[in-house]
Amino acid sequence: MLGVLGGMGPMATVDFMGKVVQNTPAACDQDHIQVVVCMAANIPDRTAAILGEGTDPFPAMRATVRWLETAGATCIAIPCNTAHHWHAALQAETSVRILHIVDAVADTLAGQGGCIGVLATSGTVKAGIYQKRLALRGFSCRTPDAAGQAEVMRAIRLVKAGQLAEATTILRAQAEAMVAAGCRQVVMACTEIPVALATVNGALRSVLVDATEALACACVEACTTGAADPALPLAV
Amino acid sequence: MLGVLGGMGPMATVDFMGKVVQNTPAACDQDHIQVVVCMAANIPDRTAAILGEGTDPFPAMRATVRWLETAGATCIAIPCNTAHHWHAALQAETSVRILHIVDAVADTLAGQGGCIGVLATSGTVKAGIYQKRLALRGFSCRTPDAAGQAEVMRAIRLVKAGQLAEATTILRAQAEAMVAAGCRQVVMACTEIPVALATVNGALRSVLVDATEALACACVEACTTGAADPALPLAV
């Protein structure tokens, strides 16, 4: 059973859940995988914490991970890129495998090495979540300059507040700038970004990598291979 | 905290969750309501059971409702119209309020009385879920004839299998037939139907009533009024 540490943000979790369902080979309800989703909206802002400006979200995330483990999750996903700053610390708290969103992205990148653009929160960028983990796979990362990064953060907050149109305009421009700067592919490395760029078509679409979808596909694979999941009701 | 007995079907649950998030007054993640969703894909087919052709889904639904109660849900929603055949029996098993989707729909219907079209599963129609409960509010119901109902069921199964385009064509024609037969409004009374009719515009859009959205709004209201919800981690 897949356990989802969700709510960071809520619409991004919904987008992730939709991508899990869409990527599950199924002809009827009963073919789908068992999932428990916690929309834990009380988790403090991740970027603020990384930038030293907010409450530590780790205790609330740890509590929800432990709760998902108790509920019977056999693997856990966190549809929030920035929250992966605490991935290793969370993994140390549970024996249940927590999939890593950057590994899921790396598995979908074309070719070997090269420069990859990363559109992400300032927290994800500052913590080096993509830079460090993609370097292990031979890729280098480009992130926007300070002014561009501020625009990306503004767009992400617009998505969280439900104002998609302006967010789409900002993020499309930033993605195009990365392609112009030589990036072969551009990772939408914040779960709000694919929500805003869902309507983008043409040449830009073909270079965008959806981290949310990559994580969803990794979850489906993890939950549909190997032993059958125990059925609900859950072991609590 | 909202508890969601989901997975009937999975994409309908995702659609419901999106409507909960969209209808929550929120400017940032932390403004959203706490939700726990069980995607209990192992629940047997509801329509088959009502038609006497399948396994009783009640034990699996009861187990999940009890689990949501243990998890700390202060109200429960079931984003599956047909499952409401067991609403009273499920409510008898828990002290947590289970919102009723037909009550949520009735609260959104325009005017007093008149004939309302109902597009639903054959199980929902045969069980009289809408007919009985809307009659209490002064409305009469029209459902498709046998051939039309078979088409509606086929469209619903197409949605569950991810084949939206053909489902949209079928359901639009059935909805238009109900308007032609004198229905003032047409309820999309199966949670798969709004997924298929999301792209319908024009005059037909203005008479369509989205039962999923009505339930989502009722949930937001139930969870944002009164005492503050206890924060996650949940009491299990």
Image (spheres, coloured by chain):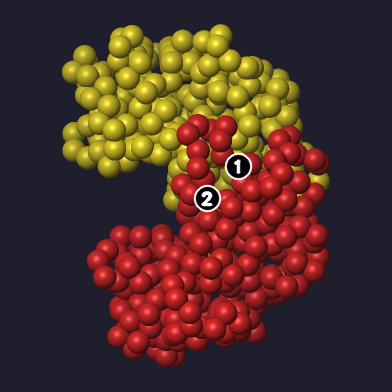
Chain colours: A yellow, B red
**Is disc 1 surrounded by few (<14), some (14 to 19) or many (20+) residues within 10 Å?**
many
**Label 1 SS:** loop
Judging from the image, mark 1 belongs to the subunit labelled B
Q: In the rendered view, tell whether residue A225 sits above or below residue A47.
A: below
> Who's the residue at 69% across and 33% down the image?
A64
Instruction: Give the amino acid type for the residue marked by disc 1 in the picture.
Output: Ile
The spot of residue A25 in percent (x, y) is 47, 54
Viewer-side residue, B28 vs A153: B28
2 and 1 marks in contact (CB < 8 Å) = yes
Q: CA distance from mark 2 to mark 1?
A: 9 Å
Q: Pointer 2: what residue?
A: B20
The spot of residue A57 in percent (x, y) is 63, 21
Left or right: A87 with respect to B72?
A: left
**Is disc 2 surrounded by few (<14), some (14 to 19) or many (20+) residues within 10 Å?**
many
The spot of residue A188 in percent (x, y) is 37, 28
The tag on residue B143 is none
Q: Pointer 1: what residue?
A: B33
Viewer-side residue, A124 vs A225: A124
Q: Quadrant of residue A113?
A: top left
> Who's the residue at 22% across and 19% down the image?
A177
**Label 2 SS:** helix
Left or right: B227 with respect to A162?
A: right
Left or right: B112 with respect to A108?
A: right
Q: Quadrant of residue B9?
A: bottom right
Instruction: Give the amino acid type for the residue marked by disc 2 in the picture.
Output: Val
Q: Outermost residue, front direction?
A: B112
Residue B55 appears anywhere in the view = yes
